[in-house]
Image (cartoon, rainbow, N blue to C red):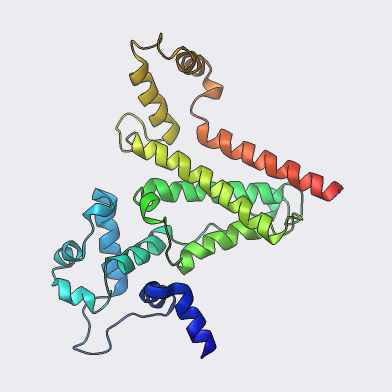
């Protein structure tokens, strides 16, 4: 009984999300044979969010897309907050597999964790690119689903044999995740769906070039930097990769110091 009380105190009014994400709730306990499923409802909501953002999702809109009444949905999902929790976890999907030992050495080798974390970051960036609404949905106090927690598991596992403490492993994953989110957020705010460019750095470069036209005297340092990248293809559109590699460099130096110590 004490365990139940502790669980209730931790999740509070989000207990419904816990049940949906982790408890295997799939169908109503009363009424006729169900014609819907949580998966169908969630996939429909994700399609709406992909097309029009999270604001385009409502219980009424999802019900209409499915040709059911809104009350029919409530037999499966208590409300929008629980639906969004399901959407996040389904949109995240499963994390990438660990890199092949033949390609990256083996866990415990000097470079394996770096390859594993880089591949993890690239896969996470692709998820944010496919579902930009995740950037706003996956913030604040909420319940993580099994898919999302699986992403954390994969990243922490990559650092398990580096000598970092458990807290340091978790902190490192938070830092890498923060960088991925930051680049995705900036590119989304500048118009990720622009027909002129598909990559985040290209979007930012295009926006800067357009804003600086006729304003180089007011912003000479930015103008000079943009002009320099325009003349040097090796340094163009590298905000995402540059930042990630510098984070990994810092982790590698920190891990090396710990091993020497």
- Is residue 74 placed above or below 163 in the rendered structure? below
Left or right for 166, reference 50: right
Q: Relative to 237, does residue 252 appear above or below in the rendering?
A: below
Q: Nearer the viewer, residue 129 or 101?
A: 129
Q: Quadrant of residue 74?
A: bottom left
Q: Is residue 103 visible?
A: no
Q: Position of residue 229 (x, y in %)?
A: 50, 19
How many tags in the picture? 0
Residue sitting at 41 percent across and 8 percent down?
Answer: 217
Residue 139 point in image, percent of width and height: 42, 55
Residue 1 vertical placement versus 196 (above, below): below
User: Which residue is depicted at the point 68% across and 39% down?
Assistant: 249
Point out the residue furthest to the top here: 217
The residue sitting at the right extreme is: 261
In the shown orientation, is residue 72 left or right of residue 204? left
Residue found at x 46% / y 12%:
220
Q: Position of residue 140 (x, y in %)?
A: 42, 57
Q: Quadrant of residue 13?
A: bottom left
Q: Work out whether residue 22 or residue 129 is closer to the camera in this orientation and state it.
A: 22
Question: Please, is residue 196 above or below residue 79 in the view?
Answer: above
The residue under the point 21% across, 79% down is 35
Q: Position of residue 31 (x, y in %)?
A: 19, 89
| One can see residue 256 in this view | yes
């Amino acid at each position: 009984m004490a365990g139940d009380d502790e669980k209730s105190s931790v999740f509070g009014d989000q207990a419904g999300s816990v049940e949906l994400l982790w408890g295997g709730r799939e169908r109503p306990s009363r009424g006729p044979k169900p014609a819907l499923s949580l998966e169908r409802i969630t996939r429909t909501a994700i399609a709406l969010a992909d097309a029009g953002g999270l604001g385009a999702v409502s219980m009424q809109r999802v019900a209409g897309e499915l040709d059911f009444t809104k009350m029919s949905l409530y037999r499966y999902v208590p409300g929008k907050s629980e639906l969004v929790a399901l959407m996040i976890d389904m949109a995240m999907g499963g994390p990438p597999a660990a890199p092949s030992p033949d390609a990256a050495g083996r866990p415990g080798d000097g470079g394996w964790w770096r390859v594993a974390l880089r591949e993890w970051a690239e896969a996470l960036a692709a998820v944010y690119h496919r579902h930009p609404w995740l950037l706003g949905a996956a913030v604040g106090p909420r319940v993580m689903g099994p898919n999302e927690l699986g992403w954390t598991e994969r990243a922490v596992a990559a650092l398990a044999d580096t000598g970092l403490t458990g807290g340091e492993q978790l902190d490192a994953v938070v830092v890498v995740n923060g960088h991925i989110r930051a680049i995705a957020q900036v590119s989304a705010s500048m118009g990720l769906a622009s027909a002129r460019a598909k990559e985040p750095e290209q979007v930012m470069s295009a926006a800067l070039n357009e804003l600086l036209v006729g304003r180089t005297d007011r912003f000479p340092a930015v103008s000079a930097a943009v002009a320099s990248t325009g003349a040097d293809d090796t340094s163009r559109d590298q905000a995402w990769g540059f930042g990630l590699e510098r984070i990994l460099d810092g982790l590698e130096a920190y891990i090396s110091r710990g091993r020497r110590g």
